[in-house]
């Protein structure tokens, strides 16, 4: 039995991924590029044990065994089905996966990005040790992680920081080429964002049932009448403007565009048929509070919890105003962080 361990950070998108290219849905090719911050202090630690034999998977998440009938298991099985398309030998092993999140409960987040990034890296590491694979480069590793969960590609680059996931399908030919062109890379290291705070604000109650991203984005691509217009606008206007703001360290502009991108994404969700409503009253209260501030931004993913960016000198005040909305136990302050690393077993 060979055992490897990897610890991988989560990430939060400034410009969102929401939808797969209909022709390449099975390859998890996004309709547009997205960018994200790698987050310090929120990791998944994955231990992978590999043994020769007919493929079999056991999966423990945060100490609990995940049954083959659970949706978390489906995602993992699907990942191994997909990678065995490229790497046939993936079917010649038994896998024992244990993944733990060190996400503070106050963050309210549990993300597949950190988990699939760690799993993909652990798989590549194990297969290199077994001489089934050469050492893959970061670009190839992010492609591999993408097959587990799109956003996981953005957690792979070893320098972390601000990461872009290139949609990549424009000048491609074969499926293998299409897949290879859709990868993530670091644009700016964490130190570039020294002075920026990231504050998680948890508004979610445990029992809320929400539309899963994978199903939700499929419905949006199918039913939002101006979906491709949104894609076009973000790709051609918002993304270049965001990159320009970051290049100039124009944080006021970066915050403004971040808020806009979050709002646009949730507008797309609302216009999906049937509508996908991720934000609740507390979320919209956070929006009203942060929207007027030039030195802060909010962003929301597929749920009501907020991630708020603020300049460090105002971060305390911003966090206090968030505590007034979500309760003092429900915020967690961190910063932009580095990429994945080997973990102790
Ligand atoms: C993002 N989200 O860019 C967007 C914003 C949620 C809202 O990526 O089907 O779990 O596994 O590729 O990556 C969540 O979707 O979906 C996501 P799959 P994923 O972070």
Image (spheres, rainbow, N blue to C red):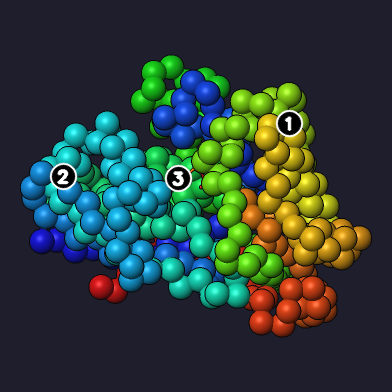
Q: Spot the residue most to the left.
A: 53
Residue 325 higher or lower than 239, as above or below: below
Q: Say if disc 3 is inside 8 Å of ligand 1.
A: yes
Relative depth, front residue between 82 and 343: 82
**Separation of disc 3 and disc 2 at Cα?**
21 Å
Residue 45 appears anywhere in the view: no
Does the residue at mark 1 contact the one at mark 3 (Cβ under 8 Å)? no
Instruction: Please give the residue where the numbered disc 1 appears in the rendered image.
Output: 230
**Separation of disc 1 and disc 2 at Cα?**
42 Å
Q: Secondary structure at mark 3?
A: loop
Eye-nearest disc, 3 or 2: 2
Crowding at dot 2, Cα within 10 Å, few <14 / some 14-19 / many 20+, comes out as: some
x, y percent for residue 125: 25, 54
**Residue 315 as seen in the image, left or right of residue 96:** right
Q: Spot the residue most to the right.
A: 292
Instruction: Please give the residue where the numbered disc 3 appears in the rendered image.
Output: 149
Eye-nearest disc, 1 or 2: 2
User: For the point 42% across and 31% down, which residue is it?
Assistant: 27
Instruction: Please give the residue where the numbered disc 2 appears in the rendered image.
Output: 55
């Amino acid at each position: 039995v060979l055992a490897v361990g990897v610890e991988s950070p989560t990430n939060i998108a400034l410009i969102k991924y929401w939808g797969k290219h209909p022709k390449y849905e099975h390859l998890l090719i996004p309709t547009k590029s997205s960018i994200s911050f790698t987050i310090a202090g929120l990791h998944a630690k994955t231990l992978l044990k590999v043994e020769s034999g007919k493929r079999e998977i056991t999966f423990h998440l945060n100490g609990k065994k995940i049954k083959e009938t659970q949706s978390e298991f489906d995602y993992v099985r699907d990942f191994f089905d997909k990678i065995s398309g490229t790497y046939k030998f993936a079917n010649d092993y038994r896998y024992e996966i244990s993944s733990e999140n060190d996400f503070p409960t106050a963050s309210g987040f549990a993300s597949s990005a950190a988990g699939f990034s760690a799993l993909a890296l652990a798989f590549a590491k194990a297969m290199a040790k077994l001489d089934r694979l050469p050492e893959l480069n970061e670009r190839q590793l992010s492609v591999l992680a993408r097959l587990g969960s799109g956003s996981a590609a953005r957690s792979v680059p070893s320098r972390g920081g601000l990461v872009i996931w290139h949609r990549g399908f424009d000048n491609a030919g074969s499926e293998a080429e299409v897949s290879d062109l859709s990868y993530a890379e670091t644009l700016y290291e964490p130190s570039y964002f020294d002075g920026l705070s990231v504050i998680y604000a948890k508004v979610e109650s445990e029992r809320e049932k929400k539309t899963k991203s994978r199903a939700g984005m499929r419905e949006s691509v199918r039913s939002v009448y101006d979906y491709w217009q949104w894609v076009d606008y973000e790709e051609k206007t918002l993304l270049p403007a965001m990159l320009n703001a970051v290049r100039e360290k124009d944080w006021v502009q970066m915050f403004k565009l971040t808020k806009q991108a979050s709002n646009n994404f949730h507008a797309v969700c609302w216009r999906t048929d049937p509508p996908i409503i991720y934000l609740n009253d507390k979320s919209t209260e956070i929006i009203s509070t942060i929207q007027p501030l030039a030195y802060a931004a909010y962003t929301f993913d597929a749920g009501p919890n907020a991630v708020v960016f603020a300049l460090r000198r105002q971060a305390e005040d911003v966090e206090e105003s968030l505590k007034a909305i979500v309760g003092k136990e429900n915020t967690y302050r961190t910063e932009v962080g580095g990429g994945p690393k080997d973990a102790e077993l």
